[in-house]
Image (cartoon, coloured by chain):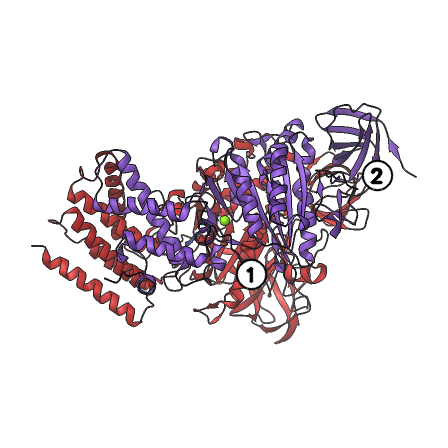
Chain colours: A purple, B red
């Protein structure tokens, strides 16, 4: 027999408090209001009082609406039938088709035992030299694109997503504009991957609590496919919207904020999601790419800052280019030792010289005369930007490395590059006179 | 003191559970919350108000209900100590992760606990105490070989007073729970000793005659550390830096190359992937000092960022206790914690749940004293038998926004002996290790004579000043003399301070070689370059840097090594001659 509770004590923010018994922490409930049914999650137990976070928000909830407890955590049905489908942040269809069916999966599953993780060692070739040469992307990596509104971050995300050649692509949209959702769908369709893609989309018009569910839904489904041996790619955009949803909810619950209104557990909450990226020992993998828009283009803002501490690097998208400074792939050294013997040397030398070029530019901008060395650096910087950094360039790794050598040889003497002799002798494109 | 304390859950808020206890309740006792499906979740009493006990649960609390039972014992959160700790990979509560993987598969299921040491393994015990000997806490009763070490079986550290050995096991194979001795105290009370004992993690383990001033350099083989900002055995240091600046890599290379007996690595609240790297690499890496795998001298305690936050808070103490245990055997131990900021954040989360009055950035008011107490666990001890043991602690700090003016960095700087501050500008320019040579400091004396270190520090500071000035007056407004100073500072930076962690040779420089290279670099920066114009100066220094860099990559004793050294010597001699 189904048991209903209707003694709602308090309604505040998205939280409804009801008297009930035998309810477990973190379980799910259904609340029936004049607006229909909504899921709700138990976020606190105090004696007989059960606090529920209502997914659809508490607008229109009355103090004698009915609450029914499901005695299970939030779940998502899992099966191959999910492929090609679009859902919302409560895992309801958004594509006008029937609800998903399959084995129910608890979201927010336990942590993977580090012992069962493999060392990631497969490079994902993107054809973008700023990634492949300087910050190689690796299967199972968790990596965000740091950007600001107006930059083509979703395009870049989709481009990498398509190049990555994954078995399954899962898109999680948080606070996504409807147009952007359509763009992703079109990109997937044109790339011929829609049939192996799953989309969980929360738009800015949807309830804020559902925004919080999106990463968990994506990652629970992705993890399951990975356990079945699939190579899964999860794209999350925009994780700043996720963090802002956490903030909004924490504030309505009167938690003490730690930094610019964000709750003290922002790091832990985001880490719980990003850490789902995994290369399973004897099974598949899950790579997580995300977009993080930086409020005020400020990387020290709590969202990008905490993200950078969690993820395995970040790509800075700035003025339509991936910036060499600040961009980082922490897993690059797992793969770039086995590509070509000059890969690491080129990677270090080109960035070190570009850093020096930046100083020379500053001098120039201050109106100082350029020394011969400055002139070399200035020339180098320009060539490097035109032939390597430009995002429209699409080159295989080896061609990109060759191109770097050419640029170096056009600008410098070998000893000036700081590259060690043995490598220079092998790769320097000496011009035949 | 023992005996069970029971109660029922009345509230659940995340990892904080409040229980109403039947009668007695002891602060800091540990026990379990019994979930209705039979799962037991480890918890600790962290506050008592009347009959109400506030509990922090070391697991996800999903599924706990009001009315569920709790059960506690008057014991504090403890670890088990004995042979078999080396080479282990533990979670923050000393559950061995390989065993958990065998029992529960890919995931860490809440409520599965495995003892930290196996009672199935036998150890080759040799007694050293004799019947009739009078012993106190920490005295050695016998030994067992554990990998590369002779592991001392010590009288329980919690003992008070003297005991007389009544019986001691003869040499042979024993498990850690087998009786190896019986002792009797002055009142005639008898006690049984096994090879294992427990110790509460939050109480420093320090059974010794006295504490000594740490002075002996701990060679890490990272040049900028050993030569410029040294650390010592028994000392403390911190590595603050923004994300991506190289804190973890520096800790990893230190754990690999440091000239020390035992390394305990506390992976606290950071990426699981970084632990996997150590986990997979270390068994394969041979420690050149012992000829055995690095894993044999290493213990990993990992509570990564997605693991429960209360256990994260405990994990650094677990690691510290294991480290102190090996110090009690007269070994030199290094504890590396990455990152202490995650530990501090765990305290902040718990403090927030308890609704304590928050301090700066919502950290609890006791943050600084906790940090200080943690680093105080380091030190050189003169043990009860007169031998020395040391524990060195190095912690990374992950300041919000990379700004060192925040409570964890500031609280740490007050108590450590060396500060290796990482700089974003240096890591952006790929100048690794990105330790800022101007801001960092060390109160210890290292492997290079202080006068020479000072000379180089001055050069770096002057070089920096010249560079600053050049941004105002330009290169043309700078004298050749000043320009030479800037170039020499750059040279020392490029060729000595920077080091390629991913190169087999350059990645680790032994003390002897460091001294030698340092002196050569000193000869170069002392060269009189008067009379050269700026283009010539740059040319000369580019050449010197090129020789040095290649020299750094050449293995000691190889023909390249000799060749580059020869070139450098010739270069120096040429320059010395060409000045009038
Ligand atoms: N000493 C070093 N030599 C070469 N590369 C380094 C060094 N230190 C850091 N790096 C690079 O920077 C990345 C980030 O370093 P890491 O130690 O993980 O940073 P943090 O722990 O400070 O966030 C590494 O993955 C590596 O690519
Ligand atoms: Mg780190």
For label 1, being within 8 Å of ligand 2 is answered: no
Judged from the image, the secondary structure of the residue bearing numbered disc 2 is loop
> From the image, which quarter does the C terminus of chain B lie in?
bottom left
Residue in view at x 52 percent, y 33 percent: A149
Residue B300 place in picture, x, y as percent: 56, 58
Between the C-alphas of marks 1 and 2, the distance is 43 Å
Q: Within 10 Å of the Cα at label 2, are there few (<14), some (14-19), or many (20+) other Cα atoms?
A: some
Q: Which residue is pictured at 84% across the width and 24% down the height?
A: A64
**Disc 1, disc 2: CB below 8 Å?**
no
Image x and y of residue A18, in percent: 80, 29
Pointer 1 local density, CA inside 10 Å: few below 14, some 14–19, many at least 20: many
Question: Is B434 left or right of B360, judged from the image as shown?
Answer: left
Q: Which mark is residue B279?
A: 1
Q: Chain of mark 1?
A: B
| Residue B264 to residue A157: above or below | below
Queried on whether the Cβ of the residue with tag 2 lies below 8 angstroms from ligand 2, the answer reads no
Q: Quadrant of residue B567?
A: bottom left
Residue appearing at x 37%, y 45% in the figure: A386
Residue at numbered disc 2: A22
Left or right side of B248 for A362: left
Q: Residue B323: which numbered mark, if any?
A: none
When the figure is inspected, residue B388 is found, relative to residue A246, above or below; the finding is below
């Amino acid at each position: 027999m189904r048991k209903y509770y209707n003694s709602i004590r308090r309604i505040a923010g998205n939280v409804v408090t009801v008297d009930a018994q035998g309810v477990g922490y973190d379980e799910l409930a259904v609340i029936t209001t004049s607006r229909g049914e909504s899921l709700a999650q138990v976020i606190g137990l105090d004696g007989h009082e059960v606090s529920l976070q209502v997914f659809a928000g508490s607008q229109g909830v009355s103090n004698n609406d009915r609450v029914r407890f499901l005695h299970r955590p939030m779940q998502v049905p899992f099966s191959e039938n999910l492929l090609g489908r679009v859902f919302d942040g409560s895992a309801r269809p958004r594509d006008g088709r029937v609800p998903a069916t399959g084995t129910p999966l608890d979201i927010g599953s336990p942590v993977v035992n580090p012992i069962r993780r493999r060392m990631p060692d497969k490079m994902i070739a993107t054809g973008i030299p700023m990634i492949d040469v300087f910050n190689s992307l690796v299967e199972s990596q968790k990596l965000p694109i740091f950007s600001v509104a107006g930059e083509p971050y979703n395009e870049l995300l989709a481009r990498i997503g398509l190049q990555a050649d994954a078995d399954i692509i899962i898109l999680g949209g948080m606070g996504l504009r409807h147009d952007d959702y359509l763009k992703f769908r079109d990109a997937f369709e044109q790339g011929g991957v829609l049939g192996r893609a799953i989309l969980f989309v929360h738009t800015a018009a949807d309830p804020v609590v559902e925004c919080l569910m999106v990463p968990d839904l994506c990652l629970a489904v992705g993890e399951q496919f990975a356990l079945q041996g699939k190579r899964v790619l999860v794209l999350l955009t925009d994780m700043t919207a996720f963090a802002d949803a956490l903030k909004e909810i924490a504030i309505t619950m009167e938690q003490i904020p730690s930094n610019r209104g964000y709750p003290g557990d922002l790091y832990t909450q985001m880490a719980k999601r990003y850490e789902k990226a995994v290369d399973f020992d004897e099974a598949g993998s899950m790579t997580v790419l995300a977009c993080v828009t930086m409020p005020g283009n400020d990387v020290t803002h709590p969202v990008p800052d905490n993200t950078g501490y969690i993820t395995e690097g970040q790509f800075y998208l700035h003025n339509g280019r991936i910036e060499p400074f600040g961009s980082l792939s922490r897993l690059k050294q797992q793969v770039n030792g086995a590509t070509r013997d000059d890969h690491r040397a080129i990677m270090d030398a080109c960035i070190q010289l570009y850093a020096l070029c930046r100083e020379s530019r500053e001098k120039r901008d201050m109106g100082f005369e350029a020394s011969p060395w400055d002139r070399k650096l200035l020339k180098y910087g320009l060539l490097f930007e035109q032939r390597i950094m430009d995002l429209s360039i699409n080159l295989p790794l080896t061609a990109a490395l060759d191109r770097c050598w050419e640029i170096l040889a056009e600008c410098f003497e070998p000893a000036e590059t700081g590259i060690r002799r043995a490598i220079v002798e092998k790769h320097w494109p000496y011009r035949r006179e | 003191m023992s005996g069970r304390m029971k109660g029922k859950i009345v509230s659940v808020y995340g990892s904080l559970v409040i229980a109403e206890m039947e009668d007695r309740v002891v602060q800091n006792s540990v026990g379990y919350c019994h979930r209705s499906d039979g799962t037991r979740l480890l918890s600790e009493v962290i506050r008592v108000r009347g009959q109400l006990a506030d509990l922090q649960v070391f697991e996800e609390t999903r599924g706990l209900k009001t009315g569920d039972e709790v059960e506690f014992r008057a014991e504090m959160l403890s670890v088990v100590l004995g042979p078999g700790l080396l080479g282990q990979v533990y979670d923050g509560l000393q559950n061995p992760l390989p065993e958990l993987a065998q029992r529960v598969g890919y995931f860490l299921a809440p409520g599965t606990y495995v003892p930290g040491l196996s009672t199935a393994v036998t150890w080759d015990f040799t007694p050293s105490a004799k019947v009739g000997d009078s012993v106190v806490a920490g005295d050695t009763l016998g030994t067992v070989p554990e990998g590369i070490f002779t592991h001392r079986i010590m009288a329980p550290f919690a003992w008070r007073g003297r005991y007389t050995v009544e019986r001691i096991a003869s040499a042979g194979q024993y498990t850690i729970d087998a009786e190896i001795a019986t002792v009797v105290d002055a009142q005639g009370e008898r006690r049984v000793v096994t090879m294992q004992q427990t110790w509460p993690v939050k109480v420093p383990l320090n059974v010794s005659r006295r504490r000594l001033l740490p002075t002996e350099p701990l060679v890490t083989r990272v040049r900028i550390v050993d030569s410029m900002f040294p650390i010592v055995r028994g000392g403390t240091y911190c590595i603050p830096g923004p994300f991506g600046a190289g804190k973890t890599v520096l800790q990893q290379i230190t754990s690999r190359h440091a000239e020390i007996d035992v390394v305990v690595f506390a992976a606290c609240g950071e990426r699981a992937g970084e632990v996997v790297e150590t986990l997979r690499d270390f068994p394969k890496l041979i420690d050149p000092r012992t000829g055995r795998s690095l894993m044999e001298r290493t213990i990993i305690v990992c509570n990564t960022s997605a693991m429960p936050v209360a256990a994260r808070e405990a994990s650094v103490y677990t690691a510290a206790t294991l480290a102190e245990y090996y110090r009690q055997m007269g070994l030199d131990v290094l504890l590396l914690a990455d990152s202490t900021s995650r530990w501090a954040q765990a305290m902040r989360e718990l403090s927030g749940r308890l609704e304590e009055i928050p301090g700066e950035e919502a950290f609890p008011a006791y943050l600084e004293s906790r940090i200080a107490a943690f680093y105080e666990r380091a030190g050189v001890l003169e043990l009860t038998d007169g031998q020395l043991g040391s524990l060195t602690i190095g912690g990374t700090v992950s300041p919000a926004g990379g700004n060192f003016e925040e409570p964890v960095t500031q609280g740490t700087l007050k108590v450590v002996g060396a500060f290796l501050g990482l700089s974003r500008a240096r890591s952006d320019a790929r100048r690794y290790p990105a330790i800022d040579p101007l801001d960092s400091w060390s109160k210890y004396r290292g492997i290079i004579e202080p006068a020479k270190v000072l000379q180089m520090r001055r050069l770096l500071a002057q070089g920096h000043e010249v560079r600053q000035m050049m941004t105002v007056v330009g290169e043309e407004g700078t004298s050749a003399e000043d320009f030479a100073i800037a170039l020499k500072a750059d040279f020392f930076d490029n060729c000595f301070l920077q080091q390629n962690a991913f190169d087999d040779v350059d990645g680790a420089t032994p003390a002897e070689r460091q001294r030698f290279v340092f002196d050569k670099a000193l000869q170069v920066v002392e060269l009189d370059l008067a009379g050269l114009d700026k283009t010539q100066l740059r040319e000369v220094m580019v050449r010197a840097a090129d020789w040095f860099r290649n020299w750094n990559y050449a293995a000691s004793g190889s023909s390249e090594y000799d060749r580059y050294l020869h070139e450098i010597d010739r270069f120096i001699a040429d320059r010395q001659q060409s000045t009038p």
